[in-house]
Amino acid sequence: MNTFDFLLQGLAVAMDPMILIYALIGVTLGTAVGVLPGIGPALTVALLLPVTYGLDPAGSLIMFAGIYYGGMYGGSTTSILLNTPGESASIVTALEGNKMARMGRGGPALATAAIGSFIAGLAATILLAFVAPTVVKLALVFGPRDYFALMVLAFVTVSSAFGESARKGLISLFVGLALALVGIDQLTGQARLSFGVPQLLDGIEVTTLAVAMFAVGEALFVAARRDTADDEVIAVKGSVWMTANDWARSWKPWLRGTIIGFPIGAMPAGGADIATFLSYAAEKRMSKHPEEFGHGAIEGVAGPEAANNASAAGTLVPLLTLGLPTTATAAIMLAGFQQFGLQPGPLLFATNPQLVWGLIASLLIANFMLLVLNLPLIGLWVRLLTIPRPWLYAGILVFATLGTIGANPSPVELSMLLIFGVMGYAMRLYGYPIAPVVVGLILGPMAEQQLRRALSISQGDLWTLVGSPVSATLLALSAIALIVPLILRARGKGKVLSQLASDED
Amino acid sequence: MSGSTPQGSGATRRPDGATLVAALILAGIAVVIWRDAARLPQAGGYAGVGPADVPRWIALGLAGLSLWSLVEAFRSGKAEREAQDTGPILWIVGGLAAQLALLSTAGFSIATGLLFAATAAAFGKRNLALTVPVGITFALVVYLLFAGLLKLSLPAGPLEGLVWDLFRGAKP
């Protein structure tokens, strides 16, 4: 069977009424959290993991992916109307989008963001369907050493290649790796770092860590800032429809954004934020109206919004085909797969094709749902922005603790929530990135397992790690990704890198 | 929502306290991991790498990062940071601690309602006579939704018992 057959089969799964409902819940929730400042898709998926424990695996995973896509759509609304990005991949959108809204062109700005997201999401999901089988074929020849090298590359790019400082990124990563050690060793059954506490034998839950860092840490950080004056929501005046001129200026940035966003999401090179910055830079350089940039150029909204959706789809390529998460949201989605006893990777395409292709096909449908949710119904989402902060954050913390209590109502779990929450606050305060901790926690044990397997095969010979062309290339790339940014920062060119910081989602 | 804070120019030569503390914490974690690894039996098998080896490497990595932070703290000097209010932090931490302490005795709704009120207070809504009842009601609705419809097991207290009694016959 070729990709088309699989995709048709997937569409049959996706058209199941229950699956459609899961997808609809996912995209609706995703849009809501994208709109609300303070919660992003990573946190929402983490909150929902314990709740979906007893539900249908395919439906739940489709819902999670819907949340991821929806978050990318919804984030633009907040950026444009409030000048506060709803999630990190929409920071660039605020630059031009908010200026457009101030000039009374909020409607077209929202429209170009939504339509751009739609086109990019659709194109990138189709790309995903065609690229994934090829990557799966490649991945079948991967041995343990190649997987280990791939994870090392992911560690480096997520932690130190971008961002303010390599030291801070690496510290975050190693804290995550250290937390990953807690619990029973997968290969020998030895208890490590459990200090006699039975609850620690199972290790630290990714969901507890993610909820603590993203929800509790974020709430503490926002509450403790002195200048917490609410930003003004700009009302959408005039038509939401774009003029012929807007269309003419938007379609090329949409396509360019897709072309930039998809590969960046697909490479183990970090999140959508990088794609949006690159797309913005590209649009600024290619625009026929460079003087408008900074004053509400529509290209500056169309390109980055397309790029962040394309990159969300791209992120699913390594997640589904290799089991390799490259963003915090993907890391938590991986935890979701594991919760249902599924391990993403080449085998999943062989053993569970209905699920994989159903997921991909559902994302195509989800894009249509999102277009409807985000254009005609935009007024509803804008109203979400008027929830006063005390109620909003109080509600977020209720749901944050609900997930943890529902998963494991033990004082140990709640204490961890509190401790990691304070840790997340301190890390935000002193500029340590959060995503590497989450990625380290989930990828650490997998990397250790692959490493020890590889060394078992070679009977302890460390040279085996660079013994295959794939692993040697990947480790060389990791070394470059570690060293080149260090040199750039030492030469005072760190500003660009810190702008490209992959913050949370 | 960026977590980065502005870094000072480093004109003063005093070491940066936060970076020093980070160095100390990292060194502490490294020691804990190293000592824990020391008590594990070495069962490397064919790999020659056992359960204690990867922890040792991570401990070494942490120790290295600790040294790097130490050097950085003295090299770059004191950094300026945004002023922080401690009041809101105490409210939220206190709310979480209260929920933790009360959860098994008072039940989900009362414990979580207090967390709700404490968080609202941290964000400036200090009128507890309003926020505590709102919080408990909200938590109770959440409880009924998730424990009743989605069968999530949440600790019940007197309030939840009362509500279940009202529904008795319809639900367990």
Image (cartoon, helix red, strand yellow):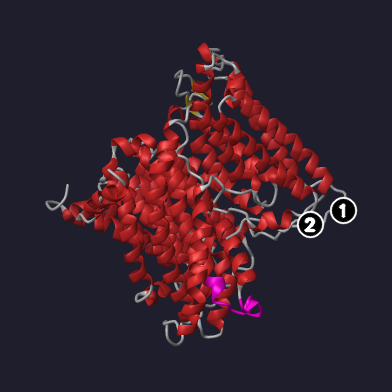
Where is residue B35? Give x, y as percent: 62, 21
B167 in relation to A368, above or below: above
Residue matched to label 1: B12
In terms of depth relative to the viewer, which is nearer, A233 or A108? Answer: A108
Magenta stretch holds residue B28: no
Discs 1, 2 touching: Cβ within 8 Å: yes
Where is residue A249? Give x, y as percent: 52, 77
In terms of depth relative to the viewer, which is nearer, B119 or A365? Answer: A365
Is residue B131 visible in the rendered image? The answer is: no
* Residue at (54, 38) in percent of width and height: A440
A292 in relation to A175, above or below: below
Where is residue B115? Give x, y as percent: 45, 55
Q: Could you tell me which secondary element the residue under label 1 belongs to?
A: loop
A466 in relation to B131, above or below: above
Residue matched to label 2: B8
Q: How many marks?
A: 2
Q: Would you say B113 lies left or right of A488 here?
A: left
Q: Would you say A144 lies left or right of A426 here?
A: left
Magenta stretch holds residue A296: yes
Where is residue A499? Give x, y as percent: 66, 58
Q: Quadrant of the N terminus of chain B?
A: bottom right
Q: Which residues are magenta?
A: A288-301
The type of residue carrying mark 2 is Gly
Is residue A183 visible in the rendered image? The answer is: yes
